[in-house]
Structures are given as structure tokens and as C-alpha cells.
Amino acid sequence: MKKSLLFIIALLFTTSAFSQNVIQLFNSANDFFKLLQEEKFTDAHAFFDDTLKTKLPEESLKKLWSDIGNKFGKAESFDAIQSKAEGQFFAVTVEGKFANGDQNFIIGFNKIQKIVGIFLAPSKKITTYLKPSYVDTALFTEKSVYIGPPGKQLAAIITVPKNVKNFPMVVFVHGSGPGDMDATVGANKPFKDLAGGLASKGIGSVRYVKRTLIYPNEFTGPFTVKEEVLDDETAAIAAAKTAVGADPKNIYVFGHSLGGMLAPKVATLSPELAGIILAAAPARKLTDIIVDQNKYMFEQANDTSAVFKQQLANAMAEIDKSRISQLGTTIKPDSVILGLPAKYWTDLNSYDQVAVAKTLSKPRIYVLQGGNDFQVSKTDFDLWNEALGKKKNVTLKFYPELNHLLSPQTGKGTMAQYQAAASVSDTLVNDLVLWIKAK
């Protein structure tokens, strides 16, 4: 099948819990494929938004479906199995079963449930987890526990090294959007890699499922990072202190992306922490990060058409709405901006992570950034360096080859890079071990 027939549009990159009716999205996706099965192409084409109708006319849709049939055989069934927010869009994964095998699709919907993009999901066979060479499972044990308030607890894993006394503990904090305890993205599990790598060298950890993944209904109204991140992080720190053999006075927080951005705030809420680690942490407003991500993805699309440029302009206009600093009569706490309530944005925009970090004389701070990270850039690392570089309690290190998931890569690439299994850098793991143990 020709790649040009698989129409792909650039979706916004931040993922989050969202209030869009998931059942309606699933039904729309299933209905679309049912119409294709019945060869009702005019009706199926009506599901598209105006832009996609122009770029993928009905005859091209018919040809696309014919090419899919030639490759995979007769279509047998379709079932929407997963949905997540991608900025102002919604990505629905549809499991397709054909006579010659299975193939999943990802359908992009806009906020009025019109289809804005279609593409083939990566093959399942490339999502197998690759255990890092530096992880020795004989050197540590893992225990399943729960953290958080009764009735709304989160599954967690406490990893502890064997035959070690008074060892340090690291608590992992997720980036934006729902995430499992391993921070799984495609074939990558960076928190699992780090937990195993640290434990193999005598350092314990706590990692847990993010609340937005397990309890999405809690986030259909106004909320802030307190409910999304901070409350559960406090509970995880408490759990780390109770790990058998751990030194309760030697607890570290490892914040990734948004989690790193919030790490200075975590330190003010838990002043007893020995250290915080800011991994790929934005130093700017989250809006600035989303702008950079979208510009990068539009550049990667290599489409200079007027229609595509207008798409970017429209996206920038929507993103700019997230810069709000206060609520008003027209913008209420539950007004949705980029899939998140306005209250979330005003709260986050009032937070200056760099300024907070500058006030911290304790705990120790480690700031790290990858050069092949297309989601958070060296611009942010330079801002951290400018503000914190002369502080005695701060260590900063730039890793030119690492991407956003902290694995070595040959280039920045796109989200497709995350579908290939790659472990967190062993150099980074070793650096963290030395830094933590140095106290």
C-alpha cells in the first residue's frame, strides 16, 4: 500500500484526561468502519471534517479501503478499544480483524467528533519490552502495594535491593496525561528500567499508576495538578519511608517532564526530601512547550501547502488560549482548553518552577536533559542552567544523545520512535546512582 494513501495529520502532543464522551467516540469509530465494510463510502466520507474531505476525497477513501483489503484480506470485525486526548483532538484505537490477520487503526477526532485523520497503528510485535542489560533481577525484590485514600487507592510497586541496609529510595513522578506505573509509551517503560537499574545498584524505589488513568471520572470537572499529581506524590513519599530496610531520611523524587516541572513544588510540600531529580523538565510555561511541539511536528510533515499552514495557525490560536492567568465571567473553572479545565491552566500558569527552585537550599537538585528530545528542548535546560548553575546544591547535566524517554537515539525523530524498544541510558543510570550515593 502506498504511504500517501494513509492520511496522517499532526495531532497536538500533550495527553490528558478529558471529558469527551468516550462511548460516543467509540461508537462513531465503529460506525465508520461498519460503513466501509458495507462499501457505503459516501456515508463514511461524511464522517470527515472539511479539511480531510478535501485532502482525502471519496474516491481516494474507496481506493484506500480497496488497498487495505488487498493486503489484509476480507474485513471481519472492528472494535474501538482505546481512546486518549491529544491536545484538542481525540485519538481512538480501533482493533481490526481481517481474513489474513489483525491490524489496528488510529482515528483522530476533533471536538465535534468529525474525523480529522486516519492511519495504521504500529504492529503489536514491536511493542515487546526489552529488559535492560544493567538490570539484574536477582539483586532486588518487588512488592505490590496500594497508596492513596481508601476507596480511591492506586496500585504501586515498591522495589528494594537485597542484602542492603539503610538504602536510599526514589519516588517516580509521571509526565503529562494518564500513565501506568512503568510510564509505558509504546515499547518503552522508562520507570521500570530505572527502578530495576537503581535497585541492581542498591537503591530502592516506588512507582505507581497515575490517577488520571484509573479514575478518569474524577477529572471531568475543574481540577489542578494538586489532584492530578501532588496528592498522590505525597502518599508515595510516605510509602517510600516505610519500605523495609530503607533510610526514611534519604528519599528522592524523580520527576519526568511535567513531573520534573512540579518537583520544586513537591520539595516545598515535603521539605524532608534529600533530593529532587528534574528529568526533561520544562523551565518555561507548559503552553510554550506545546507550541514548540506542534511547530516541530508540522515541520516534520514537510507540507508547505496553504491548507496545512492554516492548520498550524489554527492550532496556535487554540494553544494560545491556555495562557490564561485568571478566571472570569466568560471563562469558568470548568471551561475546557486543550482538553483541560481552565482552572488547571490558571493554577499552573501561576507557578514559576525556576523561581521556586532558586529558593531551595535543600534538597539537592539534579537537572538532566536529552539533546534528541523533541518534546522538551535544550532551551529549557539552558534556562535551568542560567538560574541554578551557581548553586552549590545543584548538579546539571546535558546528554546529547538522549530522547524524551531518556534512551539513546541517533536523532530527534517523531512519536514513531517510541514504538521501538529502547532502554533508559545506562550512563544516566550510573550517573544517578553516583549522585544519590554521594549525598
Image: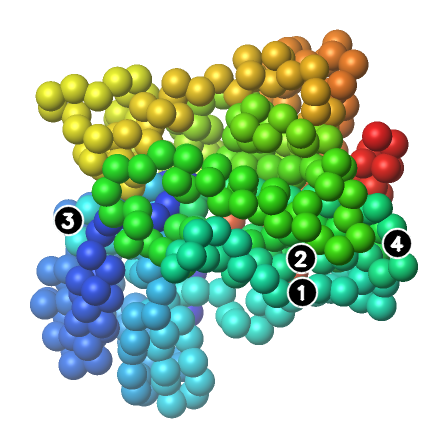
Between 167 and 294, the one lying in front of the other is 167
In contact (CB < 8 Å): disc 1 and disc 2: yes
Q: Is residue 198 above or below residue 297?
A: below
Amino acid marked by disc 3: Ile
* Residue assigned mark 1: 143
Horizontal side of 83 relative to 143 (left or right) equals left
Amino acid marked by disc 4: Val
* Residue assigned mark 2: 158
Name the secondary structure under disc 4: loop
In contact (CB < 8 Å): disc 3 and disc 2: no
Question: Which of labels 3 and 1 is toward the front?
Answer: 1
* Residue assigned mark 4: 164
Q: Position of residue 365 (x, y in %)?
A: 71, 25
* Residue assigned mark 3: 112
Mark 4 vs mark 3, CA separation in Å: 56 Å
Name the secondary structure under disc 3: loop
Amino acid marked by disc 2: Ile
Q: Is residue 209 above or below residue 105?
A: above
Question: Which of labels 4 and 3 is toward the front?
Answer: 4
